[in-house]
Amino acid sequence: MASLSIGRSSMLLLKGSIERTLVIVAAVTALGDWLFYRHTVGISLPLFVVALASGVLLGNPVRGDRRAMLAAMGVLLAALLPLVDGLSPIALLFGAAGVAYFAVLVATPIAASSSSSMTASVWLLLAGPFQLFPDLVQACKSAEHSGTAIRRANPFMVWIVPIAFGGIFLLLFASANPLIEGWFAEINLKDYFARIDITRMFFWLIMMSVTWPFIYMNGCRNEWAKLFMSPEEVPAVELPTETVPDWLFGEATILRSLALFNLLFAVQTVLDINYLWGGVALPHGMSYATYAHRGAYPLIFTAILAAGFVIATMRPGSTAERSPSIRILVFLWTAQNVLLVASSMLRLDLYVEAYSLTYLRAAAFIWMLLVALGLILIVARIVLDRSNAWLIAMNLAALVLTIYICGFINFPHVIATYNVAHSRELSGKGEPLDTGYLFGLGAHAIPALDLYIAQKRPEVPRQLLIRRDELAASHLNEIKNWRAWNFRGWRLKLYLEGKADGVAL
């Protein structure tokens, strides 16, 4: 009886707080739009973090004790200091971790000293942005239990999610593929889409997804109870466990969504097979570089969005996950997404071949590999019947291993060698060698620069030769101090000593 009473109270809480939550999320999202959209990020970021922390207090009952509140405020203040000092990846990481830890301590009964608080904070940052749609579904379930929702599924309503997500994917494909964009232009939709700020729409969607889990902590607490908390830490709250309504996120909706998504992705897949893998000539006036550059990054975002949809709908133990037809469609769609990532990598390779390699483009290659691996791990989670905690752990392990391996790669040398080998001067195609960027890579670009000089010696300006020798001399002088020794620098030192006479004389 006590648990039943708690469950009913929880339903009333969900029903009564959803309207207020939506208002707060909309307000914080609008603030984010005003602070960030098409503006340089600076002090606006810590201001937004403060606003998000305020939203946590406004949207959730305070469950932490006095000690937890003091710890939360201290952590939040410490996390804000790097952001106030200057924007950097490290400062951004601390800011995000600080506000997540603040939310966990304030809005959940987890003790400040518990290891679960750290785990829950990581979960809030990584999986929280995917809680928006499942939490709205949970709110609708609560409304059904209280008798305020439509109890009979309308056959047209099961198409809401497929059409909404299908429209998003179609717009992404149009922005990524000039051929699909041309099809829209032929049916006179170009002017209509030109009036829609697609970028701003995606910005609002991302802002709402990021803001939602902080303002509406009910869904997060329920997930933590199943994934991370020990039995002593599980809140004494029972949420409704009936199936998701068919008219929003039920089995019928998921089946229609996957069928439509597979059809849309098949169009993009066929185009890529023809033009990227099959070598079919592109329409007149369109180069492979243009075709590649338009699609590399939007298609990766498409794959990530698809992965989020699969994670949200194929929850462990759900009826959708057990459905054979849905599982087949999920596997087919995931395979198409993996091919989509492979096509994005080929697009980026074509673009790099035409316009040279940079740090950012090398990082994009690595990121695409991680996205492809993440998609494969989603399939493995479904096949092996693993939890979302396992999926997160495997992705984190892959990320850490990748970063560790990258620590052994001499990126300046790799980038310089590639750009020299594929420059117009040596290969006869592509862009002219950007020697300014080459020198900016540092001393480890010297071996590649020497290859360029050896091939083009009569035409090389004397100033470039002098700059090369100055860069070499600077490295040899630095490596004399034993404190500056490292294996990579030592190998370069041996190379430079082998060319002791330099190349400028």
Image (spheres, grey):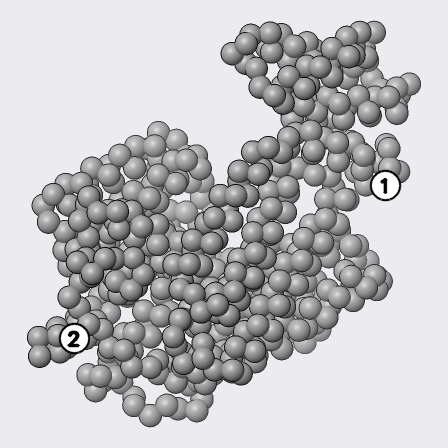
Give the amino acid type for the residue marked by disc 1 in the picture.
Answer: Lys
Quadrant in the picture for the N terminus: bottom left
Give the residue number, with chain letter if any, for mark 2.
Answer: 7
Residue 58 shows in this picture: no
How many residues crowd mark 2 within 10 Å: few (<14), some (14–19), many (20+)? some
How many residues crowd mark 1 within 10 Å: few (<14), some (14–19), many (20+)? few
Residue 269: which quarter of the image? bottom right
Q: Position of residue 264 (x, y in %)?
A: 62, 74
Residue at x 78% of width, y 54% of height: 288
Q: Position of residue 193 (x, y in %)?
A: 58, 67
Residue at x 64% of width, y 43% of height: 361
Q: Is residue 405 above or below residue 479?
A: below
Q: Position of residue 286 (x, y in %)?
A: 79, 58
Residue found at the very far front of the displayed protein: 384
Residue at x 22% of width, y 66% of height: 20
Q: Is residue 373 left or right of residue 7?
A: right
Which mark, by number, is residue 44?
A: none
Pick whichever of labels 2 and 1 is earlier in the sequence: 2
Q: Secondary structure at mark 2?
A: helix
Give the residue number, with chain letter if any, for mark 1.
Answer: 429
